[in-house]
Every structure is written in structure tokens, then in C-alpha cells.
């Protein structure tokens, strides 16, 4: 297979399944051959990202992801995407391990947000403790010129419960809990837009989109970008990866 891309997933598997579902659903097709060519790596045994970020004595997820990147690089994909926001903690190290472009999901998400909501002032961020601690989204949001709110501990506990208790453990989305989190970020913390900084939250958005709040879903955005780039490489177009965020 030539002219394909690689998806590094499994962190978690349900979130990766959501990415693949949206990718196939949104790709314009008339027959089997219109779907995009890609390789999916569902590396579910990668150590917990948040646990390592909060305590570096815990197993690191960098070595197994680096191995994945190098294995896939040998197959010569056109680009790669990593379906886990928190894993971007080691983005620089992972990109340094290959000449294949790795699309930076948080950077892509905030670039889109800046265009979509240029008049927004305060941006809410809901994510795992690991993503909060590594400042990936925080730095992107502030560098884009927006104010940031992380809510409070009560909100963080609710977010963690939705991500881990409901989605990762039970394999289900608590729509009521998800909507309550969004409403609290909007009403109590004056957030104009709420960034979903975890792919499990992206799954929640896919399953429970019936709410009035403005959200930025990095996984949904990277799906659209994967389709855009995938169709370009299929057509033999040259892509300047330095300009895809602009």
C-alpha cells in the first residue's frame, strides 16, 4: 500500500474507535475504493499517560510510542496522527524520532478555534489531570490570545469521573454528567468556548451532542484534517506540513 497515513491509537480504544467511525463516516464515498488508505495501530497497553506525567517514577509511555513511531516510519506513511491529547506531552521527542510529519492535535484544535471563534474571550478547558499538568492546551490557548479557565476541583472531579468511571471503565457516556459539566463551565466560569482536551470527551461529544454550548473538539478536528490530507496525498498533491495549521 502506498499513499497512506498512520493512526497511533489505543489510548483509549473507545476514543480511537470513535475517530475511525467519524473518519469513515465523513469521508465522501460512492464505493469501497473511495475510503482512505490508513494503518491503525491500537496500542492499548501503552502505560497510563496521566500517571506518568504526575509521577515520573511511574512507567513512561514514551518508549512504546517511540517504538510505534519507528515501526510505522519504516513503512513510509505520508503522515501520522496520535489519537490521545495527553500523549502530546512527548510530541517533540516523538517527532524527533522520525522524518514523517506527526500532526499536532492540540495545536490544530486551537488554530481552528481561533478562526472559528475570533471574538471569544474566556476559554474553558476540561481534560485529564495529566493534560492540565503538562500545560499543552493551556499554553496553546494563552499563546492564541485568550483567557483560560480550568473551572475548580469539583468540575475536575466530575470530568475525571466521566472519563475514567463512565467511559474507560464502563464503556458508556453519561450524557447528563457531560452536559452538566459544560453548563457549569459556561454559567459559573463565564466560558465562551469549552475545549475538550481528552479524546474520551470527544467520544462524549459524539454520543451526546444535543447541547447549546460552543465546544472545540480536537479529535473531530483531526478527523477532518486527516480526510483533507488523505485525499490530497491520494491525488498526488504535495503538502507543505509547515502550513497546515495556518
Image (cartoon, rainbow, N blue to C red):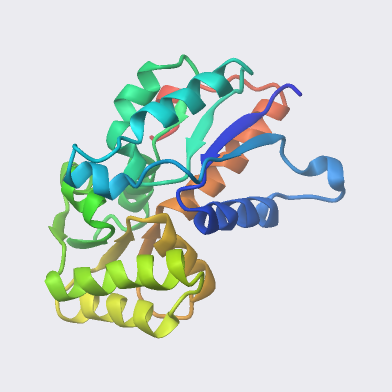
Q: Residue at x 50, y 74 (%)?
A: 172
Q: Could you tell whether 40 is left or right of 198 in the image?
A: right
Looking at the picture, how far across and down is residue 73, in whole percent? 55, 18
- Position of residue 142 relative to residue 196, above or below, is above
Quadrant placement of the C terminus: top left
Toward the viewer: 233 or 56? Answer: 56
Toward the viewer: 175 or 243? Answer: 175
Looking at the picture, how far across and down is residue 226, in whole percent? 57, 40
Q: Is residue 214 visible?
A: no
Question: Which residue appears farthest toward the right when viewing the image?
Answer: 31
Looking at the picture, how far across and down is residue 135, in whole percent? 18, 45
Q: Quadrant of residue 58?
A: top left
Q: Residue at x 30, y 35 (%)?
A: 60
Question: Which residue appears farthest toward the bottom when viewing the image?
Answer: 176
- Position of residue 140 relative to residue 206, above or below, is above
Q: Quadrant of residue 116?
A: bottom left
- Position of residue 178 relative to residue 102, above or below, is below
Looking at the picture, how far across and down is residue 162, in whole percent? 36, 72
Q: Is residue 103 visible?
A: yes
Amino acid at each position: 500500500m502506498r499513499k497512506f497515513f498512520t493512526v497511533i491509537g489505543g489510548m483509549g480504544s473507545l476514543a480511537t474507535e470513535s475517530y475511525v467511525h467519524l473518519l469513515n463516516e465523513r469521508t465522501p464515498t460512492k464505493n469501497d475504493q473511495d475510503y482512505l488508505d490508513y494503518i491503525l495501530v491500537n496500542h492499548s497497553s501503552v502505560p497510563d499517560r496521566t500517571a506518568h506525567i504526575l509521577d515520573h517514577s511511574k512507567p513512561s509511555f514514551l518508549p512504546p510510542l517511540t517504538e510505534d513511531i519507528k515501526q510505522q516510519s519504516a513503512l513510509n506513511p505520508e503522515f501520522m496522527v496520535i489519537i490521545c491529547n495527553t500523549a502530546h506531552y512527548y510530541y517533540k521527542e516523538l517527532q524527533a524520532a522520525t522524518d514523517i510529519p506527526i500532526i499536532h492535535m492540540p495545536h490544530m484544535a486551537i488554530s481552528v478555534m481561533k478562526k472559528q471563534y475570533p471574538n471569544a474571550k474566556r476559554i474553558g478547558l476540561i481534560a485529564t489531570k495529566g493534560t492540565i499538568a503538562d500545560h499543552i492546551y493551556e499554553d496553546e490557548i494563552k499563546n492564541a490570545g485568550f483567557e483560560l479557565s480550568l473551572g475548580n476541583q469539583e468540575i475536575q472531579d466530575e470530568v475525571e469521573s466521566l472519563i475514567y468511571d463512565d467511559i474507560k471503565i464502563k464503556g458508556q457516556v453519561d450524557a447528563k454528567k457531560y452536559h452538566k459539566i459544560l453548563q457549569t463551565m459556561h454559567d459559573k466560569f463565564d466560558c465562551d468556548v469549552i475545549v475538550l482536551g481528552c479524546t474520551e470527551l470527544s467520544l462524549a461529544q459524539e454520543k451526546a451532542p444535543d447541547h447549546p454550548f460552543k465546544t472545540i473538539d480536537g479529535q473531530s478536528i483531526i478527523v477532518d484534517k486527516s480526510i483533507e490530507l488523505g485525499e490530497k496525498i491520494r491525488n498526488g498533491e504535495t503538502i507543505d506540513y509547515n502550513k497546515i495549521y495556518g
